[in-house]
Amino acid sequence: MDKLKSFLSPKSVAIIGASSNPAKLGWQILSNLKSAGFPGDVYPINLHETEILGFKAYPTINELKAKVDLAVIVIPAPFVLEEVKKAARGGIKNLVIISAGFGETGKAGRAVESEIKKIAEVNGLNILGPNCLGFINYRAHLNITFANTFGPEEGKKNHNIAFLSQSGAIGSAVLDWTKNKNIGFSLFMSLGNKAVLDENDFLEYLLTDTSSDLVVAYLEEISDGRRFLNLVSRLAKIKPVAILKAGRTEAGSAAAMSHTGSLAGGGEAVKAALIRSGAIVLNDMNELFNLMRLIKKPLNLNNPDLYLVSNAGGPLVVSVDAIFESNLSLPKLSLDQKNKIIKILPSFGHVANPLDILGDATSERYAQVLGVLLAETKVQALLILLTPQSGTDVKNIAEVIGRFSLKYPDKLIVTSFIGGVAIADGKKILAEYLVPNFDYPEEAIRVLGHYLNWQKNKKSLVIYKQPKLISPRSKISGLWDYLDTKKLLDQYGLKTVKTVRVTKTNIQIKYPLAAKIVGPTVVHKSEAQAIFLNLKNEKELKKINSQPLLKKGANYLVAQEMIADGLEIILGFKRDDNFGPIIMVGWGGIYTEIIKDVRLFLAEDNNHLIREEIKQLKVYQLIQGARGKEPFDLEALVANIKKLVLLSLAHPEIKELDINPAFISPHGLVAADWRIIS
Amino acid sequence: MDKLKSFLSPKSVAIIGASSNPAKLGWQILSNLKSAGFPGDVYPINLHETEILGFKAYPTINELKAKVDLAVIVIPAPFVLEEVKKAARGGIKNLVIISAGFGETGKAGRAVESEIKKIAEVNGLNILGPNCLGFINYRAHLNITFANTFGPEEGKKNHNIAFLSQSGAIGSAVLDWTKNKNIGFSLFMSLGNKAVLDENDFLEYLLTDTSSDLVVAYLEEISDGRRFLNLVSRLAKIKPVAILKAGRTEAGSAAAMSHTGSLAGGGEAVKAALIRSGAIVLNDMNELFNLMRLIKKPLNLNNPDLYLVSNAGGPLVVSVDAIFESNLSLPKLSLDQKNKIIKILPSFGHVANPLDILGDATSERYAQVLGVLLAETKVQALLILLTPQSGTDVKNIAEVIGRFSLKYPDKLIVTSFIGGVAIADGKKILAEYLVPNFDYPEEAIRVLGHYLNWQKNKKSLVIYKQPKLISPRSKISGLWDYLDTKKLLDQYGLKTVKTVRVTKTNIQIKYPLAAKIVGPTVVHKSEAQAIFLNLKNEKELKKINSQPLLKKGANYLVAQEMIADGLEIILGFKRDDNFGPIIMVGWGGIYTEIIKDVRLFLAEDNNHLIREEIKQLKVYQLIQGARGKEPFDLEALVANIKKLVLLSLAHPEIKELDINPAFISPHGLVAADWRIIS
């Protein structure tokens, strides 16, 4: 954080490429810096001008003798590298490169970007960008962007959101969208190509920043996944962190790759990582915008229950569907609440949560009902719906709600006024009271779902510890030898079925037994028809010796004990370059691919987290002991996965490890087949 | 349809409860009728007035000698029944009951509503409501609502949407929302309590109505499910029918029940029915509103592919995620298109669909690129994204897009301009050109997904034929006898395993065999431990004779052939009061409940539809012959389900029939256990 202090709150700023032409970015940034009221020193750098916008200008950064905390580079790409070098020589530690034309344009651009990166490493520079919009630090009166966002309306806003965007376009759309709304940023960072500084540097800064109540990030690729997980899980224990990860789907991931020119890393590992991080995982831009609408202040709700009041049954029913789908609950009203509300509603009204206060509800009825509900401590989150019906005094109702929001500042009061012309004035009043209003109840509920579930889970969120990275030990490339693999599993205490190489002497395994042809040409044993179960005697075993597969290369035959019963489980891991080993556990056996009952999660030395993953499986119902059967040994499964975690962390050379099947019984777990690829 | 002609397009309207007090609904409706320019005769009925709003008033409907095509009742509930009787006596065939206070208020209200219903049946009356907003028929200049929607702006709108709403509140919100937008209704029906007329009557009318390009319905319960399915499937072959069914979830369904006081019928049957109907099944109110934004005219697109153009990579990636999730495809650009576009973009641009025309795209670049794309016939649906960046000439780009929409009236051109202040003018221009614009690309894509998939599927949509309803034949109530059940299955040609009652004489089934205790106290055989598999000889069979379960009541023992192999399938049906038998097929055996690989669909005598359902199952991968195995007899499964369909339709007394397991092999299907409950 200290590292970024002079970057984010510099005392002096030089703008390399400042211009006196208002059509140029170099003018716009200087002008925005000025109108933001930046109290430090400002040095426009321009070859031809002596003064711009009242600031004395310098022909080159070299001529400037004063200390510069931050230099902003906004000149054509071909000239950027030279300026970075000059800045480094001049002892400037912090740079923002607005200019585009680097990694995003292809090979040549990537090469220049690499050089910039090297200079930064050697000289310990902080560089934001290139190819970015710049940044805004509201409390430092600093606007290093060409978006004019410090207009008079900004002063009225509560600047409580930190926003990080890998996309300049989404960044500028967000700035534009918030302009005439009461949504303000404490920190706005356009990350650009992330050549040096990336989201993690700012997430780390935000850990000690007290000016933001919400952190929102739009990301196309996650930099240093393990550091990211550690930082997000620490931050998400303190405040909501919401992430829109573009390229969530396979198709989107491919599009992101072609757009950013980098491996976007979509797919299962990212999904598992985001869930693990404790972040609010946003599904779309609508949710991103709506979450910024929702969070006006830090709240500490000690229950995630939602109360719902509506003057119309239809929207109420639609809302209950959405509440159910958002994994929220509608608790019952207390007897006391019921008794009080019965007296307020017409005789045929049905008193419950959700509460329909009927189409003829006036502001008075809204006031009475809301008064009863909010008086109870356990009512902490309340969604109020309104549709304009005959006799609905919309403006007064908005006033009533606004006043309650002031009276109960520690509760979350949210509205959805549905309609157009008839509700417009009511919406204005709600906005003045800072009551978040949503066009449709489901939109409100979706972000309430995200937020309330974050409130609920933050306490039990476990901080992700970055594993120590060690160097690969083995030089094997490809499929491991079967018995070597067994040895490694045994070494980590994973129980494996008795297995011996079949030679001419006694094989020391009782019949019936299983035989398998193993070796370099047998990658998928079932497909290769290399498995022979239930061999009853030596004669049957010997017959296998004539299999052509056994003659190939270094293949050989092993015999294994047959396992009589138990449930088939698949376990293993696949290494992700960014997030490390991704552990897999699921329903094993021949239908694994079809049933697809599998959980993928990060490798962590934590029995609790492992157990919670197993509990999400369908096959867990069988492990528990379905249909009155004795339960299987869940703890043996947990313990074995933990061993696998330790193995995966200690052997970075292993790309993939599969155990399928392992047999779980009431008395333990034993692996019956395995495969390692490095 | 003829039935509703004089209802929807009356030549004369009486308003019972017309008032001279502008605060009253009776004044508002009269006033709205007047300002809509209704050309027919209007008769206010009011005890005290002689003239209201320039119309001669009558004290009672009896005094009015002229013929009245339609009477609107807007008086307090206690007086409504008497007026309905009077109207019936006076030969008035069409009524709208605006008044609330009937079925929705409880038992007493329901009783009055029943009486109204009876009068309607006896006298052949069409009654809309009670407890409704009324209706609008735009082309007949008829506004029988208290919402003033025929303002000057209405004349400019294209009134092309038919909207049916079971909720008055959602109806009024929709009317209010559309007021200052270019969205107009050809027909707006507030269904209220649906005492007599329901959605089906209007869906039938819409089959021959040419004024609507889109039908939207908000429903809490579906009236006469089988008629509904027939009508919607016929209508959906002609034009898009979109349904928002409140109470989709279990929780929502319970809320709808308490709200409407009726069995809302949520759950699986409704879900299966809606999908089968060919309707666009809306997920939320946002989609409902957005679909009305999307459809400005009837289009006949002969491919459902989407092309995507954006000046920003971020929103483009986010969009690809949504496109993937909406089951849409982005076809590749043709070589010709690519060659042309390469010349337009900067050298580092990546030419593909989705197409990023880069952040510095001007209106000229938009025009060139869109020109190339739209010139190709196969480009029929195009989504254009814009974020305001430095140099983006938003208004000109909107103009360019607007002009293309005029040039290509048979294509679907949709935009998402993302932002706030900077795009406001552009949005206005798009609106003038009737180009649908959405705040976020994912919102556009979700409704595009609905619409384009409807375009794709409408040709192959099979019209649902209402089965003839017959009376139940059997008086059995509860569990059927095991052998009687077998007899019925045999009678319909469903192959069952050889089964005999075990007596002292030879049982004529070879060992090993299966034995089961069956009878009135054995509902779930596995749970009751009433199944004995693999009995090897008479001695083992005889041992079962001592089971206490066998001594209970009329229980007895049967012996069955053991089936050596095959795959276990579950099939059966459950009768839904509204939609008839819901057929079930899925992965059978002991893990059925855990794997939950089951399809539920309506009973129809159509092999193609049955086969398509089976293909959705996970177990279909095994049926096809996984891992190089011989395929199982799919056609035998189809044929057996068809037999089950016929059985289910012919035996309305059967509430539930389960066959679990049936064994499918490469050579057929045979049922091994069964159960019928009536």
Image (cartoon, coloured by chain):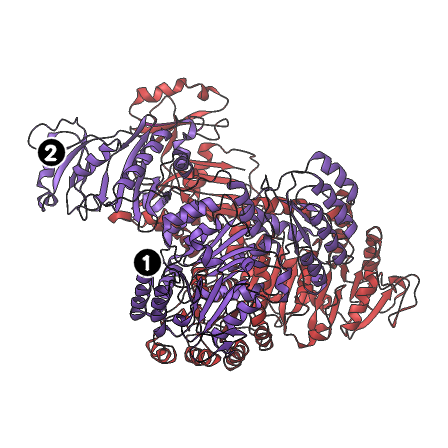
Chain colours: A purple, B red
Judged from this view, the residue extending furthest toward the top is B546
Residue range (magenta): B526-534
Q: Is residue B281 left or right of residue A675?
A: right
Circle 1 chain? A
Residue B153 in picture, x, y percent from top left: 70, 74
In depth, the one of A369 and A128 nearer the eye is A128
Q: Which amino acid does label 1 sit on?
A: Glu
Q: In this view, does A410 lie to the left or right of B461?
A: right
Q: Earlier in the sequence, mark 2 or mark 1?
A: 1
Residue A287 in picture, x, y percent from top left: 53, 56
| Residue A45 visible at all | yes
Residue A187 in picture, x, y percent from top left: 52, 58
- Which secondary structure, mark 1? helix
| Residue A275 visible at all | no
Residue A327 in picture, x, y percent from top left: 54, 44
Above or below, A273 relative to B675:
below
Q: Is residue B77 left or right of residue B307?
A: right
Judged from this view, the residue extending furthest toward the front is A65
Badge number at residue A121: 1
Q: Which amino acid does label 2 sit on?
A: Val
In depth, the one of A250 and B459 nearer the eye is A250
Mark 2, residue position: A502
